[in-house]
Image: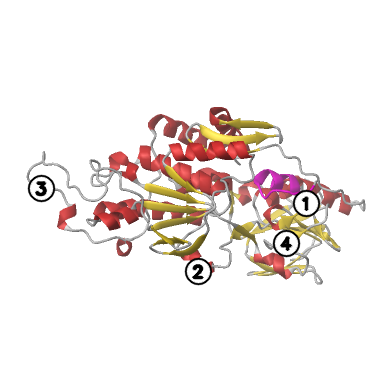
Amino acid sequence: MENNRGRHRVVIVGGGFGGLQAALRLKRLPVEVTLLDRYNHHLFQPLLYQVATAELSPGDISAPIRQILSGRNTTVLLAEVHSVDLARKVVVSDGGEIPYDTLVLAMGATHSYFGHPEWARFAPGLKTIDDAREIRERILLAFEAAERETDPERQRDWLTFVIIGAGPTGVELAGALAYMTRHSLPRDYRRVDTSKARILLLEGLPRVLNTYPEELSAKACEDLEKLGVEVRTGTLVTGVDEEGVTVGGTRIPARTVLWGAGVAASPVARTLGVPLDKAGRVKVESTLNIPGHEDVFVIGDLASLVQDGKPVPGIAQAAMQMGRHVAKNIRQRIAGRPLEPFRYHDKGSFAVIGRGSAIGVLYDKIRLSGRPAWAMWLGIHITFLVGFRNKVAVMLNWAYTYLTKGRDVRLITGLHANKLPPIHAASLPAGADEHAPEPRAGLTRHEPEPSHLH
């Protein structure tokens, strides 16, 4: 890539919250900005679980990066970065080498299965639109399979959902899935009562939402249980396969297992040759550059930074603040002035449990729960969505869902006959008598809820 205008070349890797903010702040400066991302869209990850549970469409929470950054000094390239050569000052991607004068690494994180990568095929995580679509299809296919199934035990397995990890992703998935099965789906199926679906949330730590104050964590657990979610804390999963999970010596049969337990930094961090933390994140200086290289900044989930004895959290607001600060330090660097240290300002964080139920902390002091926290959560997420169309679409979808309790994005794409049990005559209507009672097998509408599985 030639620097034919003689301008300072800034390469940003990653179009998430941090990378996008950095690019926007550099848009009017006399620099040449190149943003690389393996996707052509910016994704609002905090609402990804609503795509996975059929409340929102992928287009409602994403926007084309080229459209957001359209301008004279910005080039957007679809590329996957494999490594960085600090000595030669180039980024190595699937499309070749890209030279830089200043580099901003904002690639985020991926799933961590704690030394068991083989679990990934049985328990998908939730980081991308592809992940959300896969989870949505697994959930909906489970109900399709249960509707076909004539064996009560196998039907119960299809109607058992296990979510591993009770951080924000796991809690929000569990709450949304519980609401979906209890309120949105029951009228759609004849042979099974979806409200009898069993949803288990497993957490290895002593409580759910461990980063929140203990009383809010307890409130979230109480609200989850009211929705019908079985919460098990202090529970370590020792095995995952296509037919369930193993917890110690106990087997939990389940045909749908979802992962929300941990994250790992992008493997590109390992190519830098600098100190990393246990999660593979880069230990950055207070100025957000890597040790010994003022021309390379690392932000967002890829950065490990401790302030006042606490790590800066890997959340959207921290990444956005880092992106804006890096743009400021690039201006400092071009002007020949010293870099300024970054200071994270915690404006608060929220986690939603269900309709009218959430918990949150504002400015590390004000603690909210219930409807006030839920209303704050709604407003904050609408505010930070990118694009006017997305804001309107999400508001309308939420209003419709609130009034109707519906989940209208229940799409299964592709052919999945090989994943479903065969159709037996016993699972079809009786035929002649239109007033004949519905067939009863497994979890039907008229049978009692089964006892817990062991």
Q: Is residue 148 left or right of residue 201?
A: left
Which secondary structure lies at badge 3? Answer: loop
Q: Earlier in the sequence, mark 3 or mark 4?
A: 4
In the rendered view, tell whether residue 385 sits above or below residue 416.
above
Q: From the viewer's side, name the closer residue of 335 and 186.
A: 186
Looking at the image, which residue is at 25% across and 54% down?
152
Amino acid at dot 1: Val
Report the Cα–Cα distance between label 4 and label 2.
Answer: 23 Å
Report crowding for label 4: few under 14, some 14 to 19, many 20 or more residues within 10 A (C-alpha): few
x and y percentages locating residue 338 in the rendered image: 91, 51
Asked if residue 249 lies in the magenta stretch, the reply is: no
- Taking depth in this image into account, of 266 and 260 the one nearest to the observer is 260
Circles 3 and 4: CB distance less than 8 Å? no
- Real-space Cα separation, disc 3 to disc 4, in angstroms: 64 Å
Which residue does the numbered mark 3 point to in the structure image? 431
Highlighted magenta segment, given as a residue range? 309-322
Task: Report, in whole angstroms, how far the alpha carbon at label 1 lies from the one at label 3.
Answer: 68 Å
Residue type, label 4: Asp
Q: Are marks 4 and 1 in contact (CB under 8 Å)?
A: no
